[in-house]
Image (cartoon, grey):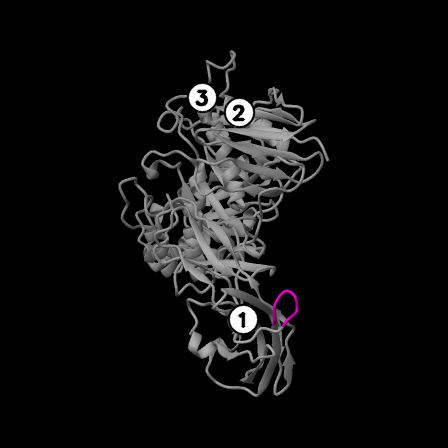
């Protein structure tokens, strides 16, 4: 059993954007310059230290990708602790000092060399080093991945990790950034955390997770997929549950039955039902149209393969964007191309690029994404990216119809390991892409939850929270008429309610998060830890859950707690703190923290 303390201050790992590094100044060239760098190495008492190896390291140096012999210049301090490095090219450098005998180090950041000038560096204070312990979530593709601290020679491969990677011999008392790259050829390493510092002999712990590409309240990211016109009452419930978006298709074959003539009456009906309730629409621009010929697949879909068919599909996309312009609508180009239409990556790549351009011609302000790749299929993702999928789009999409592909392990927390690889892959081909959409996902009551309505409720809530933490700008919950998928089917064993308790859980979640953003979160390396999210605003609110086992959650005196259905949870006092024992079956708890 673990114990976790909730404090009325920001806890956990600060959110950090998945941002890109700038290229190396000079690219590690061996070409010499005329600048000079001079300085002195001292101990913490200010006494000079001799026989210290001093290296001049470009500020954006990557110890795995860049040639050390070409990019680094070195000297050794004299008896007065002084050093001088000549023939330095213009640029920004760090001073890395290493005393191997005592295993002490120093790092001086941001020494600027300009032309033939002499750049005096601040004293490098050499101290005992520390370490940074980086938690690695499950499901990360670590065979070729590595962590590094830019501007230093510090790096570590992720291969054969045991849930953590240690970056050793880190200079103390310096704020450093830690980056992750999926392989040596990755052109856009991903920021893990921008300011990490260790004390002499100490260790700092962070987690390998990329988040906060999305911001604002959770509800702004939440969409729901279901067949709209015949389920009008469910739109009201979707709104009450906190959804902002509905995902609907006005299929090409239904819209264009005569070449060049578009009938948007069905789409207008859907849009009217949505906007009258304050909901917005993500349109799936999908499937083929037999009037343009071709060969149907097993589902009767006529995929646009020839150039004339692609042109006709793009005209439909352009017409849709023009028709729905000004309504706040968004667009997804096709749906699961590997399944519907059985399009190859090359075929879908040609369609996606052309359609993105056509949507922009119909509405220059339109926002669109590629069709979500199913189940984090990384091989499919790479093939799609190589075929140009995502070029011209505003967001890159994936679909995750639950976690059954992990051998039946239905832990929404597993999304983090998958996201790291998935995002690093697309950043390699689309370095300026900064928006992530989950265009389909959610648990099945029968297959994933064993027809346990309470489990369905807390897995639904945990998935919404994990997708929020993982940085999705949009996450679309799958809902259909099938009782296994439908969020709106009955729940006969819940206090006589005719609705699944997941609806009440969503409404409680919405009431807690609808005017708040995420301030920080804890992200354990697997599904067995205690997960928490702290929200912005006052009073301080923290969300907590335990995926496996049990743990004692401790909060300051004066705190209160409610469960995921809004019921008050009793907290036990020991005179100094309040506490409650949680397990997976507890679901999600919301703590309003007391104290200062």
Where residue 254 appears, as percent x and y from the top left, is 42, 40
Q: Which residue is mark 3?
A: 453
Which residue shows up at 51% across the image and 11% down it? 496
* Farthest residue, direction top: 496
Q: Are marks 2 and 1 in contact (CB under 8 Å)?
A: no
Where residue 260 appears, as percent x and y from the top left, is 44, 51
State the CA–CA distance, disc 3 to disc 2.
Answer: 22 Å
* Number of disc labels: 3
Q: Which residue is mark 2?
A: 581
State the CA–CA distance, disc 2 to disc 1.
Answer: 49 Å
- Magenta residues span 42-47
- State the residue in front, 317 or 347: 347
For label 3, the crowd category at 10 Å Cα-Cα, with few meaning under 14, some 14 to 19 and many 20 or more, is many
Disc with the residue nearer the chain's start (2 vs 1): 1
Element class at badge 1: strand
Disc with the residue nearer the chain's start (1 vs 3): 1
Q: From the viewer's perspective, is residue 266 above or below residue 32?
A: above
- State the residue in front, 589 or 293: 589
Disc with the residue nearer the chain's start (3 vs 2): 3
Q: Which residue is mark 1?
A: 97
Element class at badge 2: strand
Where residue 560 appears, as percent x and y from the top left, is 65, 25
Indicate which label's residue lies in the foreground, 1 or 3: 1
Picture quarter with the C terminus: top right
């Amino acid at each position: 059993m673990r114990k976790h303390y909730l404090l009325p201050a920001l806890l956990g790992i600060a959110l950090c954007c998945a941002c890109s590094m700038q290229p190396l100044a000079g690219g590690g060239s061996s070409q010499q310059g005329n600048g000079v760098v001079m300085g002195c190495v001292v101990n913490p008492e200010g006494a000079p230290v001799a026989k210290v190896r001093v290296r001049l390291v470009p500020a954006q140096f990557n110890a795995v990708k860049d040639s050390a012999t070409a990019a680094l210049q070195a000297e050794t301090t004299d008896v007065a602790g002084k050093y001088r490095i000549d023939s330095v090219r213009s640029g920004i450098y760090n001073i890395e000092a290493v005393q191997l005998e005592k295993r002490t180090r120093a790092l001086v950041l941001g020494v600027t060399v300009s032309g033939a000038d002499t750049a005096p560096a601040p004293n490098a204070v050499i101290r005992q080093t520390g370490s940074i312990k980086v938690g690695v979530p499950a499901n990360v593709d670590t065979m070729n991945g590595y962590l590094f601290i830019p501007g230093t020679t510090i790096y570590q491969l992720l291969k054969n990790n045991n849930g953590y990677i240690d970056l050793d011999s880190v200079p103390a008392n310096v704020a450093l950034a830690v980056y992750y790259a999926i392989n040596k050829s990755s052109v856009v390493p991903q920021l893990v955390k921008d300011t990490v510092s260790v004390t002499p002999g100490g260790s700092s712990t962070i987690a390998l997770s990329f988040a906060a590409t999305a911001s604002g309240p959770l509800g702004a990211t939440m969409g729901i997929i279901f067949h709209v016109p015949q389920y009008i009452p469910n739109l009201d419930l979707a709104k009450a549950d906190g959804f902002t978006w509905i995902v609907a298709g006005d299929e090409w074959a239904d819209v264009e039955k005569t070449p060049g003539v578009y009938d948007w009456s069905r789409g207008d009906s859907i849009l009217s039902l949505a906007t009258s309730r304050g909901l917005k629409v993500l349109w799936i621009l999908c499937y083929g149209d037999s009037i343009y010929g071709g060969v149907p697949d097993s589902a009767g879909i006529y995929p646009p393969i020839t150039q004339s068919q692609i042109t006709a599909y793009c005209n439909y996309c352009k017409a849709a964007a023009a028709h729905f312009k000004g309504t706040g609508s968004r667009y997804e180009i096709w749906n699961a191309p590997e399944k519907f239409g059985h399009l190859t990556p090359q075929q879908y790549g040609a369609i996606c690029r052309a359609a993105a351009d056509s949507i922009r011609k119909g509405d220059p302000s339109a926002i669109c994404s590629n069709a979500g790749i199913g189940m984090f299929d990384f091989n499919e993702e790479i093939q799609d990216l190589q075929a140009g999928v995502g070029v011209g789009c505003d967001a890159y999409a994936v679909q995750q119809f639950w976690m059954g592909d992990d051998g039946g392990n239905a832990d929404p927390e597993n999304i983090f390991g998958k996201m790291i690889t998935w995002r690093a892959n697309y950043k390699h081909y689309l370095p300026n892409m900064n928006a992530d959409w989950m265009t389909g996902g959610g648990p099945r009551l029968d297959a994933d939850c064993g027809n346990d309505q309470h489990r369905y409720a807390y897995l639904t809530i945990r998935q919404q929270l994990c997708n929020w933490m993982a940085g999705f700008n949009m996450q679309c919950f799958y809902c259909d008429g099938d009782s296994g998928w439908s969020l709106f089917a009955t729940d006969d064993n819940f206090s006589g309610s005719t609705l699944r308790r997941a609806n009440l859980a969503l409404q409680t979640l919405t009431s807690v998060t609808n005017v708040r953003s995420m301030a920080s979160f804890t992200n354990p390396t697997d599904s067995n830890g205690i997960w928490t999210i702290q929200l912005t605003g006052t009073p301080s609110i923290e969300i907590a859950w335990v995926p496996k086992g049990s743990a004692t959650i401790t909060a300051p005196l004066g705190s209160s707690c409610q469960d995921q259905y809004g019921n008050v949870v009793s907290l036990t006092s020991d005179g100094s703190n309040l506490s409650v024992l949680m397990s997976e079956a507890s679901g999600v708890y919301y703590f309003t923290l007391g104290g200062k």
